[in-house]
Amino acid sequence: MKLIKKVVVPPIKSQGIKTKLVPWILDIAPKVSGKWIEPFLGTGVVALNSGFKEAILNDTNPHIINFYKGIQSKTITASLMKQYLEKEGDLLSKAGNNGYEHYLNVRARFNSGEYSPFDFIFLSRAGFNGMMRFGKKGNWNIPFCKKPDRFAQAYITKITNQVTMAEKIIQPTPDWIFCNKSFSEIIPLASENDLIYCDPPYFGRHVDYYNGWTEKDEELLFNLLSNTKAKFILSTWHHNDWRENEMIDKFWKKFNIVTKDHFYHNGGSIENRRTVVEALVCNFNIDKIDKHNHGIKSMQKPKQLELDLNEQLKY
């Protein structure tokens, strides 16, 4: 169990990010002597706050993995990110059609096969509604947010500060290992001393995921976690105002489950703009934890950890 007072926010942005849920997730995490294993890394927000010195971090989205590998190898630094965003942000502000022409240029450059991690951050921050979506051929296909002044100095400072925090936290190889594989190849690597945290796509919800998600994927995940010797925590949704998550009753009800009210803003669907009851499924004892909204009364709202904007980084 780890008490989180301030949440480290990752440089990568996407809908469904777990920033506000990090304290709730880590509050039930048992103390283990082994590694943190995350088969669905996503933005990396939970891993960056986990406090583990050893980790296996995986995602099928190669752009996420390449970005964090770049930070790990120091080919991506806060200084380089600042220089890049200042240059591209200036071009965006001066481009025709209220910046849209330059956004299309960066997107075309990225989709041509360059797949620059810097362009990846630009697109994720300049894309519509904070969405991260790729076509069947792996091309970025999110439209522009229509904000030509998106990369104002304060916003660039915010992103570079987030890169700085990631630089401080990410451990060198082989302590932290980043993988671009199927979750089915990662979970079997866990030993009895490890903790697996799974945040797969939510079945039946309109969320973005690089490869999609089916009931067969959910069943495979269930079978793998049912047979692991490691402790695990699975994030999923329990119900909303319209319906229940049928996967809970079909697969996960044999494990221990805690729930929490949470609000998502996931795109244009009205259904996805309402409160969703989140669920954590785990294979260890949680008898001393309230089954719904645990820790809410005693837990203060976590602050997002940012460097003081007045304490300018020296680049």
Image: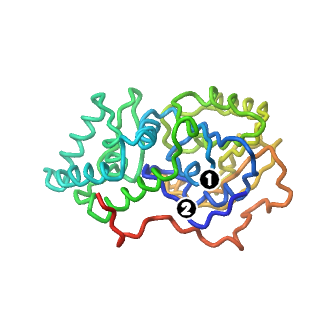
Residue 20 placement, left or right of 152:
right
Residue at position x 76%, y 40% from top? 193
Residue 111 placement, left or right of 247:
left
- Can residue 268 be seen at all in this image of the molecule? no
Q: Residue 238 appears at what percent x and percent y?
A: 69, 50
Mark earlier in primary sequence (1, 2): 2
226 lies above or below 150: above
- Which residue lies under the disc numbered 2? 7
Of 310 and 106, the residue lying toward us: 310
- Rendering colour mode: rainbow
150 lies above or below 63: below
144 lies above or below 228: below
Of 234 and 250, the residue lying toward us: 234
The crowding category of the residue bearing disc 2, from other C-alpha atoms within 10 Å (few below 14, some 14 to 19, many at least 20), is many
Disc marking residue 51: 1
Residue at position x 23%, y 41% from top? 104
**The quarter of the displayed image where residue 203 is located:** top right
The crowding category of the residue bearing disc 1, from other C-alpha atoms within 10 Å (few below 14, some 14 to 19, many at least 20), is few
Q: Residue 32 appears at what percent x and percent y?
A: 75, 47
Tag nearer the camera, 1 or 2: 1
187 lies above or below 291: above
Residue at position x 70%, y 52% from top? 279
